Image (cartoon, rainbow, N blue to C red):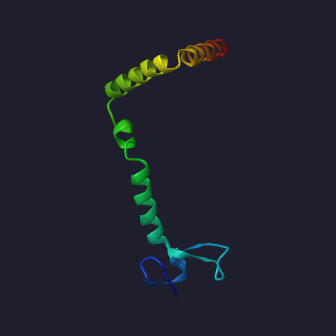
């Protein structure tokens, strides 16, 4: 039995992840506390992604067109070079088929 440093509950050794740096070879936090922490961290880091990933294709196309316009205004040389490189790769793919 080992005590989790977060929830302070006694749990069996199977409830803890491995950590070679610790004396007993187990991490200080139980697997459940680590999982909850990772979920909270994911939500904090990815606040905007669900709206962009789950949007309809029409919304995504408008987002992409606005992004291209913004990129063209900010750095036209990069935009033109990237477009040329994309078209070259596309031609090579078609010719290879």
Is 34 displayed left or right of 50 in the figure? right
Q: Position of residue 97 (x, y in %)?
A: 64, 16
- Left or right: where does residue 41 sit relative to residue 16? left
Q: Nearer the viewer, residue 58 or 79?
A: 79
Percent across and percent down for residue 78 are 58, 19
Seen from this angle, which residue lies furthest bottom? 1
Residue 58, compared with residue 29, is above or below; it is above
**In the depicted view, which residue is nearer to us: 76 or 27?**
76
- Counting every numbered tag in the picture gives 0
Residue nearer the viewer, 39 or 15: 39
Residue at (49%, 71%) from the top-left corner? 31
Picture quadrant of residue 95: top right
- Which quadrant of the structure image shows residue 91? top right
Q: Residue 39, how many percent across, how many down?
A: 42, 59
Give the camera-side residue of 74 and 30: 74
Q: Residue at x 39, y 22 (%)?
A: 66
Residue at x-position 51% and y-position 74%: 29
Residue occupying image coordinates x 42% and y 65%: 36
Tell me residue 21's x, y (percent): 67, 74
Relative vertical location of residue 77 with respect to residue 48 in this rendering, above or below: above
């Amino acid at each position: 039995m080992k005590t989790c440093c977060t929830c302070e509950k006694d749990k069996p050794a199977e409830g803890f992840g491995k950590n070679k740096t610790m004396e007993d070879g187990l991490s200080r936090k139980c697997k459940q506390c680590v999982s909850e922490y990772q979920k909270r961290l994911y939500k904090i880091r990815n606040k905007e992604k669900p709206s962009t990933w789950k949007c309809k294709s029409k919304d995504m196309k408008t987002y992409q067109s606005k992004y291209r316009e913004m990129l063209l205004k900010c750095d036209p040389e990069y935009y033109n070079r990237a477009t040329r490189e994309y078209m070259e790769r596309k031609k090579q793919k078609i010719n290879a088929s």
